[in-house]
Image: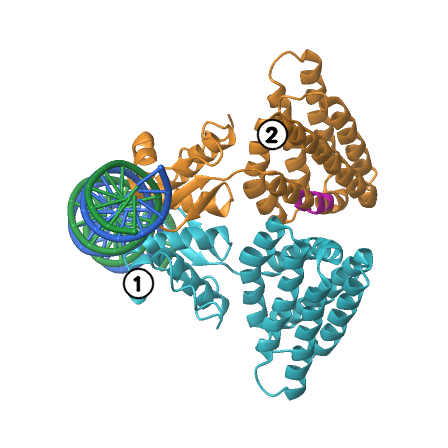
Chain colours: A cyan, B orange, C green, D blue
DNA sequence: AAATCTCCGATTGTCGACAATCGGAGAGAA
DNA sequence: TTCTCTCCGATTGTCGACAATCGGAGATTT
């Protein structure tokens, strides 16, 4: 896992990363109460750093804190995810438009290479469908970085990215969308290479809308199963 | 000030609000080092809650923390503000489109009334130009709330809102943009009333672009004066 | 039996002190 | 003089203990 590295820095940062990982992977269930003393002992640290970590995660919207009542893991209900995808559509669409103007040819080629490796992974298929999901996020993040907008990188990279990963973990079972998604990614890269920002934005927005439709359906099934 | 009320809740929350206020109003200069012990004493609390507050403000991008080197007030340079306004354009444009579909007639009428009170304030002119700025933000936030998108409200309300206010405080001296801005606001409300989301989005994007142009010019003057 | 009140355990919020780390002043050598 | 190295003060990072607050179990009343 690439996020295990930041074992440097303050204990609070370490705790934040470990907690985020536990939440994203579902090791900590949605809505679960987070006991400070228990977590502090599990991580081998005092409650001080852990509280700072919880504050950080609260800012990322991974946990919800209620004064004098502790923190709980956020629950990704339909409304939350719907709102998230709507924001993503606007933000990543914008990122594409900017990226078409600012990315270097080398960076775009690198993006294309990333898709090649994804295609390879899909052909091997077998297990590890989620790794494609992680790769998919890599693709999106690469474009966001290409936009050159720091605020955008922070919003989509550090913050919402975690919520996205959390969502993916829940819905990674259905892999039937990986191939059309890859095609859409290719089209987006093509648009970027042609420096057609308008088209790139349009394609990205459709791509995200498609992803939302897929996830929305899945939520429906889950709900009627319950 | 409407943000003085949350003197309830944990000390960390109180500290976060007071710090945010001090930063936004410029009482704490940009780039200034924030000494934990000093601030803790000034606020009459221990360093624990204050550290949590700093973490919170870090998430809001009001302060920048460097491990083992403390926290400093963020500096709003040209690039940061440019990125901020670009994101605002995308997000508030989207908010307008959603608001046109979801706001009730009563809410839109209330928005219109808000503009009337702004016009009144402008006629009185005299001092307190910044109060119009605060009012302007009220207008924008009202629309964001009208969008019904929780994520959007969080991003534009709790987070970037503070950065915006900080920017306004620096640039509130030029009031010559208040009247055209008010007209643009009126047009936006008209579009909302006609349930024309496309137009409302377009107008809001132009409005924000105009605001950025104005601020950008001001930064130019400041820079060549220095 | 249902509702309410009281008290207690558990958990969060807060503080003060100690340890670790960094930046800078000042001495010494080239 | 200037560069570097060392040491020291200041500041941050961390911990353990204490106080405040909340939720719930159990007793009491109607």
Left/right of residue B124 with respect to residue A31 in the rendered view: right
Which residue is at 60% across, 29% downward? B168
> Residue at position x 64%, y 63% from top?
A142
Q: Is residue A168 left or right of residue A101?
A: left
Q: Is residue A83 magenta?
A: no
Kindly identify which numbered label has been placed on residue B142: none
Which of the 4 quarters of the picture holds residue B215? top right
Q: Seen in the image, is A145 located left or right of residue A12?
A: right
Magenta segment's dominant SS is helix
Location of residue B123 by image quarter: top right
What residue would you read off at disc 1? A38
Chain of the residue where label 2 is placed in the rendered structure: B
Could you say which is closer to the camera, residue B144 or residue A206? A206
Magenta-drawn stretch contains B89: yes
Please state the total of marks drawn on the protein image: 2
Between B128 and D30, the residue placed more toward the observer is B128
On the image, the x and y values in percent for residue D16 come to 18, 55
Which residue range is magenta in the image? B87-93
Q: Say which residue label 2 marks.
A: B168
x 74%, y 62%: residue: A204
Image height of B200 relative to A77, above or below: above
Q: From what the image shows, is residue B226 above or below residue A119?
A: above
Q: Residues within 10 Å of mark 1 (few under 14, many from 20)?
A: few
Mark 2: which secondary structure? Answer: helix
Q: Is residue B10 visible?
A: no
Quarter of the image that includes the C terminus of chain A = bottom right
Where residue A26 sits in the image (x, y, percent)? 48, 70
């Amino acid at each position: 896992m690439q996020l295990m590295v930041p074992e440097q820095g303050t204990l609070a940062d370490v705790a934040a990363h470990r907690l985020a990982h536990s939440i994203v992977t579902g090791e900590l269930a949605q809505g679960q109460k987070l006991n400070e003393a228990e977590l502090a002992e599990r991580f081998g640290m005092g409650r001080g750093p852990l509280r700072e970590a919880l504050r950080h995660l609260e800012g990322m919207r991974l946990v919800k804190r209620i004064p004098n009542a502790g923190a709980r893991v956020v629950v990704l209900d339909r409304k939350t995810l719907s709102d998230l995808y709507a924001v993503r559509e606007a933000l990543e669409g914008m990122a594409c438009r900017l990226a078409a103007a600012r990315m270097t040819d080398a960076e775009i080629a690198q993006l294309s290479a990333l898709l090649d490796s994804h295609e390879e992974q899909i052909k091997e298929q077998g297990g590890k469908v989620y790794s494609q999901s992680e790769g998919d996020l890599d693709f999106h993040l690469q474009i966001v970085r290409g936009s050159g907008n720091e605020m955008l990188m922070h919003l989509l990279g550090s913050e919402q990215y975690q919520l996205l990963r959390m969502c993916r973990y829940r819905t990674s079972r259905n892999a039937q969308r990986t191939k059309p998604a890859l095609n859409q990614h290719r089209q987006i890269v093509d648009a970027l290479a042609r420096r057609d920002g308008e088209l790139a934005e349009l394609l990205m927005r459709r791509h995200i809308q498609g992803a939302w439709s897929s996830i929305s359906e899945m939520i429906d099934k889950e709900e009627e199963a319950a």
